[in-house]
Amino acid sequence: MYLPLLLLLTACDGKTSDTQVVPRAEIIPEPPPARMWRLTEHQYRNAVLDLTGVSFEGELPIDYDLHGYTNVGAAEVTIAPYDLELYENAAWDIAEQLLPDLTALENETTCPLSPNTIQMLDAQQPTVNMDCVEQWISIRGAGFWQRPLNTDEVDSLVTLFTSLTEQTNPLLAAQAVISALLLSPNFVFITEIGEIDNDGNIRLTALELAKRLSYFLTNSPPDEQLLAAAQDGSLHQADVLEFQAIRLLQSPKAQQALLDFFRQTLDTERITTIDKNADLFPKDSEELRRGMILELEHLFWSAVESGDFRDLLTSDYAYVTPDLATLYGLDVDNDSLQMLPASQQRGGLLGRAGFLALQSTAVRSSPTHRGKFIRTRLLCQEVPPPPEGVVASLDGIDPTLTLREQLEQHMTDPACSSCHELIDPIGFPLENYDALGQWRSQDNGHNIDASGSLDGVQIDGAAQLALAVSEHQRFGYCVTAQLLRHSTRNLEGSLQEGYISDLSDSFAAGGYNFRELVVSMILSDPFRLISGTLQGDSCNTNGEERSCNSDCGEGVEQCIDGVWQGCNAPPVSIELCDDIDNDCDGVIDNIVQDCEYTDTVGIQECDSGYWGECSVLQTAETCDGIDNDGNGSIDDAMTIDIASVSFADLQFWHSDCDPLTDGVSGPCNAAVNRFCANRGCSMSTGYGPLALDIVNEQASVVCLHSDQAHNSNVSYETLGIYLEYCSENDPVSANCNASIHRYCKDIGLTTGFGPLEHSDGTATVACTPNASVNQVSYDELTVLQNLCYWPEERNSEACRTAMHQWCTSQGHQTGFGPLENYQNDAWIACIPTMETE
């Protein structure tokens, strides 16, 4: 009952959702939770290079950017089966590069082979001293895993080496050991468990702190000096931690690691792929874009070194390539540092071509994109999404006006004004720069008005805008919040606001010195402490073992990463419903069993030694001649049927439908429509394929009852009114998805999909009366299906599957889309379960 109220409170109301800088007195700050995080691509390659000397150039799993940073994604997204294959291939490749032959094996292990003469492996099988091999495995393993290996771990690797040596040869056996070490979660993942400090807080262990510090500042594992401070425990001392932080900050790796933070904050890597109209912007080139990225990175590092990070926004100096210099009206022959023309009023970041081109469309500038970036990424203020059904288009407005004038007319729509008033007045001062970042004084033949405002401060032009942002109370807070997010791999919440406020206050008091902010953050509680419950008692010596007793009898537990991992006594029995942990897994009565429920099978759970009531898990009815929901009726109240259909059957219904080549096509839309219409159970139409089983040549499709989908014939001329880019020449597209969505809403239904069929300028579409429209980022969809991503694959089978999965994860039966797209967000339709209809 509270959901409508919450939606009203969070919709655009003319105010930003501004995180409170100074927390309320009753909120007690709490450190972020402990994390287990996967090495990012850069971190994996750096770790391999540091630990083996091998520069691995092969393919690795992609990094997911969540909440703006791949570090956060690495702590929130696990690895898929295909990712595991990539890690396995990488491990073997690295092992073969490290140990290409027997000579390399001797040098690596320092274990002499017998016979000493290196010959062909098949000539006289060389042998190796196993005591020496065991010592090599212990040393190598401790280096790779950044901790001593326990007895079981060493024994298993020795067994692997011995077994493969007997079956093949010691070279392959040693390569397998290296591969196993690299493929282990102990290498690919970093686990934080923590220990209790003298004040009763949960702090990172010294080794965990060393890893967090090193991967934050260098994107690499701890070096020998840092490891030594972790191993003797001195890293917990504030002066030692500060010394190590300052030392690492002075290394070349730190510059690259902090540049990586800046690249992700600004998303500079996307500059190489943004689309610009070649006819409108003939100066655009790969070399120009290289210059844009180089300039922004130099600007960032100059602001770091200057001691006042606000120089990022106000500096008039630019490091330019010849192509970029030409864009700025300068004449230089080589990459060099230049003063920008005063007449162009560029200032720092906001007037640079890379930023301006990134926050524009293919054909024109975008005050909306530019203003939104400033709000969300420089001031950390939320801009609520547009209300459902709002058309984010300037269609119908006089195209001869300046873009500013068109947007001002657009803002007269009450549904649009509240959001645009938050961002467009910040973007208007940047209108003197076109979509490539070139200076201009006119737009559409009219003089440009570059005035605007930021939270009551009147602005005219980019330089004044940059100064206003640099002096805004949210700027320092935002830099601090995003740096903390990046360094701890946690999206900050209300319980961290007090920490952020204190750090940003110190940042401002110190003249906005970025290096000092980094050191202060490393010394702060949210970097050193964690929240949560420890897995076990703390211990001092990794690899140490001790005897233990549990309900299952005597066993052994081991010290790993400073924590006793639990007793490994063999279980007495399987788990029983007796309020005892019979299998000694740490959980009592975690079992269920079948039970009789009228004329069907139910299920009951054990709780505190007693079986609960027998109940039936409700299953949605499907069109299969079976009473799926157990209500005594077969195929009753059918509204949705998720069915499996063979490729051959789809081709039967439309001969041009080839799911393997292109399942998102007009012929496949028609095939699914016809299959569902002939499915029975009052199914009228459907959409898909959602997922393909290539081995068995089966596809999943969704069929809808006539109550859930109303078919309608509409001309492409009419669909073109809703979005001019939808045409019969490209009927199955994101543009036509939007047109169909808007058409269905216009005739009084919530949304729709199609075309189901089309010919002679007319399309048959399906409109749905009770679907809900939801906004979801492509980042979230990519997590569900890694081949679904913005913008290239937004209308793909992978995205169809991801949208279906997203809707089912929210408690709905299914879903489809994208209905609309805006930047990195999709609007998708979810069809509710029967209980909510």
Image: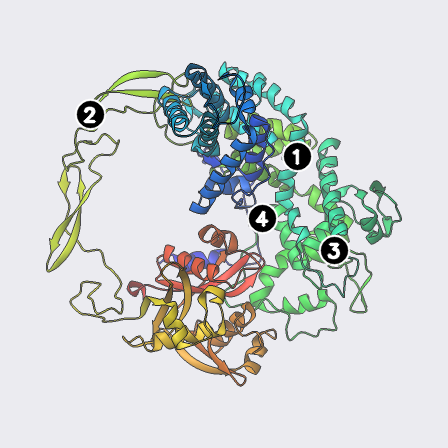
First along the sequence among labels 2 and 3: 3
The residue mark sitting in front, 4 or 1, is 1
Asked if residue 319 lies left or right of residue 119, the reply is right
Q: Amino acid at mark 1?
A: Gln
Neighbours of disc 4 within 10 Å: few (<14), some (14-19), many (20+):
some
Name the mark on residue 256: 1
C-alpha span from label 4 to label 1? 28 Å
The image shows residue 753 at horizontal and vertical percentages of 46, 72
SS type, badge 1: helix
Q: Which residue is mark 2?
A: 552
Residue sitting at 26 percent across and 69 percent down? 623
User: Tag 1 or tag 4, which sits nearer the N-term?
Assistant: 1
Q: Which residue is mark 4?
A: 381
Q: Badge 1 local density, few (<14 within 10 Å), some, or many (20+)?
A: some
Quadrant position of residue 130: top left
Q: How far from the left and from the top, in percent, is residue 172? A: 47, 30
- First in sequence: mark 1 vs mark 3: 1
Considering only vertical position in the picture, is 687 above or below 261? below
Amino acid type indicated by mark 4: Gln
Residue 429, numbered label: 3
Residue 165 seen in the figure: yes
The answer for how far apart the CA atoms under marks 4 and 2 are is 54 Å
Given the image, on which type of amino acid does mark 2 rest?
Cys
If the image is split into quadrants, where does the N terminus sit? bottom left
